[in-house]
Amino acid sequence: MAFEYEKYLRMDKIPHLWCPGCGIGVVLKAMLRSVENMGWDKNDIAFVSGIGCTSRAPGYIDCNTLHTTHGRALSFATGIKLAQPAKHVVVFSGDGDATAIGGNHFIHACRRNIDITLVVVNNNTYGMTGGQHSPTTPIGYKASTTIYGNIDPTFDICLLAKAAGASYVARATVNKGKMLEKYITKGFEHKGFSVIVATANCHTQFGRKNKMSDPISARKWIESREIPIDKARNMKALELNDKIITGEFISEEPEQTYWENYNHPIHEYTEAYQRIREKAQAQDKH
Amino acid sequence: MKKSVRFYSGAELVGKAAIDAGCRFFGGYPITPSSEIAEYMSVEMPKVNGTYIQMEDEIGAMGSIIGASLTGAKVLTATSGPGFSLKQENIGYAYMAEVPCVICNVMRGGPSTGLPTALAQADIMQAKWGTHGDHPVIALTPAYLEEIYELTIKAFNFAEIYRMPIMLLLDEVIAHLSAAIELPKKEMLVIKDRRKPTVPPEKYFPYDTAYGDVPPMANFFEGYRYHVTGLSHDKTGFPTTDPDLVQADQERHLRKVKANINNIIDYEYYQMKDAEVIVFAYGSTARAARVAVDNARKLGIKVGMMRFRVIWPLPETEILKLCSKAKAIIIPEMNMGQLSDVIERYAADRTKILRINHVGGVPIHPTDICNVIKEAI
Ligand SMILES: Cc1ncc(C[n+]2csc(CCOP(=O)(O)OP(=O)(O)O)c2C)c(N)n1
């Protein structure tokens, strides 16, 4: 039976503002299927976003939705989750939103290991503002601000999340919707901060400047660069410049060495804070 | 019954009053001279099942309180000059999305890092115009410890009544002052809560003007499933670029304060009956001004003081009246004339304005004010 997306969408807000063939739609679908997999009540979910094409997604979802300021979604989401720890808080972010202007909130949300799921749609560019280069535009590629070729090194958002303390980290591309759905569902199930990076095509901005201005060629570019994480482990850094490493980045075994598992989280933040409340109240009685 | 007399600092009184007003979420970032408020909240919030969080910066602190407020919590953040600057974009968001919150700014000298540990009243204008765009503003300026308690509660009530951010502006010396204080009894306090929708979710619009200029606000997770954005929006909460709707919405925002100005303005007259010369003052400067007025009275000078407990909005009608009858208006401020510039517009050529502006971090002495009073006659 076909999946009923209508159940989760604000149909009166469709058509959406994304370009035909945009990768964000695939991510949104994977997200809604994951909500269904979890059996969550729509009233119990808050979808939070910053600013950008990606960040328009919550507006289409029939839940509690919050479209905040550029880069700051995780801070708003942190307030919501701490005030209502039993509810589900999901953040939707672009690569610029999450790791440029919002980079500080990103690493600290990872560090706190607060039970929020962050889905980053990485289209390697600033889509909404006209295709300027972002922290994930590969070296040598063109953007409206790097017509001579980008020289700014990139972040690997997954490795960044892992180093900063996130406790579930995975990446899939929009060419593999099922894989995305699996990872987002695992992120939802996971107790702690989870980061799922969805590599997506922005043929309109990134693609147009790099000889792949239609959805098919932009997705082919993604396909040609995808490297599963097990294969990537044995590859040289230089070989991985503009590659897309997919798979799960976190091993859940705390007994690994510090170097293999730096910043392994010790607790989930809202649970830890609940223990602080109990401690404070017990001391107050004396 | 045992009286609740205890030693409190100004910073502790902000926290105590916040909790008594129902505040259950504090998001902050340390900065002198406001950090004592965060420290107090870190101790007290968990005791009342509330939350204290130290965010990664003031931008995040402001975001966190807006998020918590949307779930129904009363929320506070505290900061000082540079942190207040960082918060501005999200403060604008809270105005636009109409999210109740209280921002306490223990002022310090600026611009930039300025004078971190010294007295200043540097952010009177930043409190009014700090974020981009037009918006209403309510800012309170307590001068005494008891008043910090009283006005902090008032700030929370205003936030709930008008669905907007409220500024609580403290002078460093008042935040750091400690004294034995008798607080009002809990049952004497008037505590306001935001109006919640009475209609079922399918009939709810988050910005429905059918209920007046302050629409009822639903909490997240209570079945209403609405959308909140900082983009200009219509009554449903979704973005609009319709010029008429955007215009009407901005006008409604301003009306929330303008139409209720008599419930918001708050000032005190001192020795005003026969006063020919008038001192306009707020915060700690008003305490020096009061001594100056007493001293000048001893010399036979007819001088009085108007002290603003709420600095924005100003009591325009009263100020205009005083401008028409006063020989001179003296305005001592720990900035380069942020209030004076505004009062000068009211005064036009009806009276002369004499300014006293100290920005070196040292309090304005009563003698400084008394000397100008003598000059004025
Ligand atoms: C404080 C601030 N700076 C800049 C902008 C302008 N701006 C809007 S969206 C955006 C970048 C969007 O790129 P990304 O986050 O990668 O999301 P995408 O549109 O590609 O999904 C920028 C710079 C803004 N809205 N606010």
Image (cartoon, coloured by chain):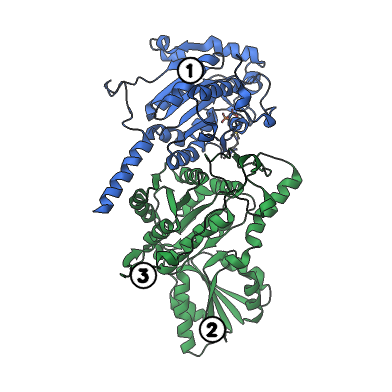
| Kind of residue indicated by mark 2 | Val
Eyeballing the image, is B231 above or below A182? Answer: below
Which is more toward the observer, B134 or A26? A26
Q: Are marks 1 and 3 in contact (CB under 8 Å)?
A: no
Determine which quarter of the picture holds residue B173. Answer: bottom left
Per the image, the residue denoted by label 3 is B182
| Kind of residue indicated by mark 3 | Glu
What is the residue that sits farthest to the right in this orientation? Answer: B244
Q: Quadrant where the N terminus of chain A lies? A: top right
Per the image, the residue denoted by label 1 is A182
Q: Position of residue A89 (x, y in %)?
A: 48, 34
Q: In the image, is B306 to the left or to the right of A20?
A: left
Per the image, the residue denoted by label 2 is B303
Name the colour assigned to chain A in the rendering: blue
Q: Are marks 1 and 2 on the same chain?
A: no
- Of helix, strand and loop, which one carries label 1? helix
- Work out how far the residue at label 1 is from the one at label 2, CA to CA, in angstroms: 76 Å
